[in-house]
Image (spheres, grey):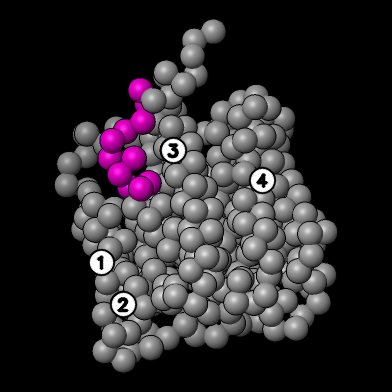
Amino acid sequence: MSWTALLVLAAGTYALRLAGLVLRERLHLPARVERYVDLGATALLVAMVTVSTLFDGEAFAGWARPAGVAVGALAAWRRAPFILVVVLAAATTAGLRAVGVA
Amino acid sequence: MRSPFRSFFRAVDRGDLRDALALAAAIAVVGASFGALAAAGGVPPLLIVAMSVLVFAGGAQFLVVAVVAAGGSVVAAIAAGFLLNLRLLPFGLAVGDTVGGGWRSWLVGAQLVTDETVAFSRARPAGPRARAAFWVCGVLLYTAWNLGTIAGMLAGAAVPDPDAFGVDAAFPAGLLALLLPGLRRRDARRVASAAAGLALLATPVLPAGLPVFAGLLGLFAAGPPPAPETPPATSPGTEA
């Protein structure tokens, strides 16, 4: 890992972020397209949730993590406060791991 | 010109601040584990800190350090990190209006665009509250991530595995909680189901970052937009 490599990654990442923000204003998207931009963010976030719930890299993450996320999801669906959702998910997964569930 | 700061602080909701602090606490733990892992992997201290300050994307940072530690080439590591961060462009597009107009907002706000800040601000009503939520969440997460990194780097091997605390379940659960209100819209629900299925199928076969874009194909399931402006008050009993 070198400074050059780091700066390339940092600049590339920053450019992606900035491009999105600036394009939103410059493109003057019609309402129909804006709807897809918004739904697209939902799609990407749901995909992120799915991948990070079930996978470690390309392999199954084990049962403890999805079980914790499921408990958190249930709490969120029952309109529990955000903090409770996060804590319940973490506590479930931590508890399962403490008793030996991977 | 009215002070942007005064109107900003007036717009910060107490509950939003509390929720953002909860996310920040979790981020700090992950940041500490990144700092410890990178230090153990032989990355020089200044480089570790600079990485968290300049890249500020946990997934990519872990990935790059892991690829290099496993003996992969630096070019492969950077490419993998960049691929994982590609989603930040459509995220920026989605929160462009929320972050605020003008170059000063864009230049600073860009660095704060992450999965969490996007989900967090989109979960609030559009306008001043969403804008305040984005900035409060962004600044808190940025601070927590970098302080966590430094603490973890200094503590080194003394940092416990965050998996023991279930932090890896906290993030997807938190994101899901933020997404749920938006999924009451029928078209969003169709897109979400398709996106989850596609990402699931793509993960074992595509390199990290691309499965999330496979989820974007879920847009084809969007169907027609929801009926415009149905007054919800006149239809009791339709909830859930």
Q: Mark 3 lies on which chain?
A: B
**Share a chain, discs 1 and 2?**
yes
Residues under labels 1 and 3: Cα distance? 24 Å
User: What are the residue bounds of the magenta stretch?
Assistant: B10-21
Q: Which mark is residue A88?
A: 1
Residue A88: x and y in percent read 25, 66
Q: Where is residue B75 in the image (x, y as percent from the top left)?
A: 82, 70
Q: Residue B136 carries which label?
A: 3
**Which amino acid, mark 4?**
Arg
Q: Which residue is drawn at 32% across and 33% down?
A: B13
Element under disc 1: helix
Chain name for mark 4: A
Q: What percent of the width, then of the height, locates residue A102? A: 38, 88
* Residue B19 drawn at (x, y percent): 33, 47
- Could you give the CA–CA distance between mark 1 and mark 4, rounded to whole angstroms? 32 Å
* Identity, as a three-letter code, of the amino acid under mark 1: Leu
Q: Give the chain of mark 2.
A: A
Viewer-nearest of discs 1 and 3: 3
- Circles 3 and 4 on the same chain: no
Looking at this rendering, what residue extends furthest in the top direction?
Answer: B1
Q: Is mark 4 on a helix, strand or loop?
A: helix
Is B20 magenta? The answer is yes
Q: Is residue B77 visible?
A: yes
- The answer to whether mark 4 and mark 2 are in CB contact below 8 A is no
B39 with respect to B130 (left or right): right
Residue A2 occupies quadrant: bottom right
Q: Which of marks 3 and 4 is in front?
A: 3
**Residue shown at 80%/72% (left/top)?**
B74
Question: Where B178 falls versus A72 (above or below)?
Answer: above
Residue at horizontal 55%, vertical 66%? Answer: B153
